[in-house]
Image (cartoon, rainbow, N blue to C red):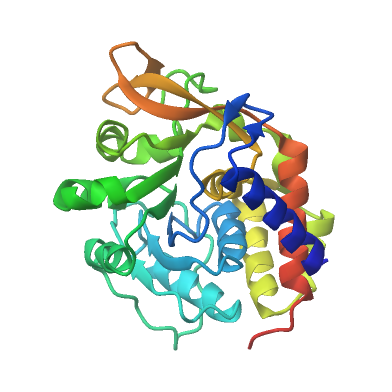
Amino acid sequence: MSGELNRERRALVDLARFGLPQTVAGQPFPPSEVGAPLVVDTDAGGDPDDAVALVLAAAEPTLALVTTVDELGGERARFARHLLDLLGRADVPVVAGADLGNTRMNCVEGLVPDDVPAQGGDVVEAVAEVCARTDGPVRWVGIGPASNLARVLTTRSDLRARLVVTQMGGAINYRDPSRAEHNFRVDPAAAATLVSTAELPKLVLSDTTFTPEIEITEGSDLHRALAAGPAWARLVAAHLDRWFTRFHPGTIQHDALALAAALQLPYVDLFHERVLLDGIGRMTVDPAGHRVRVSGGANHPAFLRWLTRGLETALDREDTR
């Protein structure tokens, strides 16, 4: 199974490298970013789609840094640290980022051993260190509010051209017109900075991600496999159980789809658009707006097969602890 997954990745990389047409979007692939360091910025600990995305990101040798946002007094960072350690990625630093004062979305209290220490808190310096280790681009994958990214973009303008930003967030046709999508709603000022300041960011919109086609549900095959798996998988399963009990009997894999887009896998159809945000983070298309790339659709069944294979490959590896 691992060999099959690696062959698929190599084939996709070759497509990107040689600039062959992207059949879904009908546009050429952008320049390959394969090998560029990967930074994942996450609000892990609420909806467990973040934890699933972290498992998949941990399989990437280029994963260089994990930062946490919308912090819960450092508990999101401790959870991410513990999960990465169980996955054999103790080499990846975790930095606790912006705490926005929210407390509702916490499904991991008590799941992290007391001996897992608090993580460092200087996101800007950590990102600058990743950038200093390479002359090329650095891939930033935002799967939480954009608070940390906004701080990096505004305090280190010299890094703007280095960061290839993919953000899960925003919506053009959100299901509730009275409010913005969650990641943009939690910190609308940061979302506005992202849209106006990052260089041609990729926005994987809720319009694209919000579908039961990519949902892991209570009692599903994946849920049961995780619950019977090694330590990292049992941690994720316990997290899922908390979510299923407290919020919803399923978790849509918004964040893993954004990760796939950041890895330039051909599951998300991206196109150029100009958008504006209002004061509460709602997005509209406007010819006078900021130029971004937005998702216009996705091959959800193919993406779910990739996600499932990635989790199964991780489950097949021996427990690291």
Query: Is residue 126 or residue 31 the one in the foreground?
Result: 31
> In this view of the protein, which residue sits in the foreground, 229 or 306?
306
Can residue 317 be seen here? The reply is: yes
Q: In the current view of this chain or complex, which residue is farthest to the top?
A: 287
Q: 287 or 283, which is in the foreground?
A: 287
Query: On the picture, is 264 further left or further right than 130?
Result: right
Q: Looking at the picture, does residue 307 appear above or below residue 2? A: above
For residue 207, which quarter of the picture?
top right
Q: In the picture, residue 123 is in which quadrant? A: bottom left
Quadrant, the N terminus? bottom right
**Which quadrant does the C terminus fall into?**
bottom right
230 sits to left or right of 125: right
Residue 150 in view (yes/no): no
Provide residue 53's location: percent of width, then percent of height: 58, 56
Q: Residue at image x 71%, y 70%?
A: 314
Where is residue 43 shown, x and y percent of the image?
A: 44, 55
Picture residue at 76% right of the left edge, 59% below the top: 7
Task: Please report the residue visible at 67 percent of the width from the left and 53 percent of the height from the top.
Answer: 244
Left or right, 7 with respect to 108, comes to right
- Give how far across and how far down residue 6 sits, in percent: 73, 63
Whether residue 170 is situated above or below residue 230 in the rendered picture:
above
Residue 272 position within the rendered picture, expressed as x and y whole percent measured from the top left: 45, 23
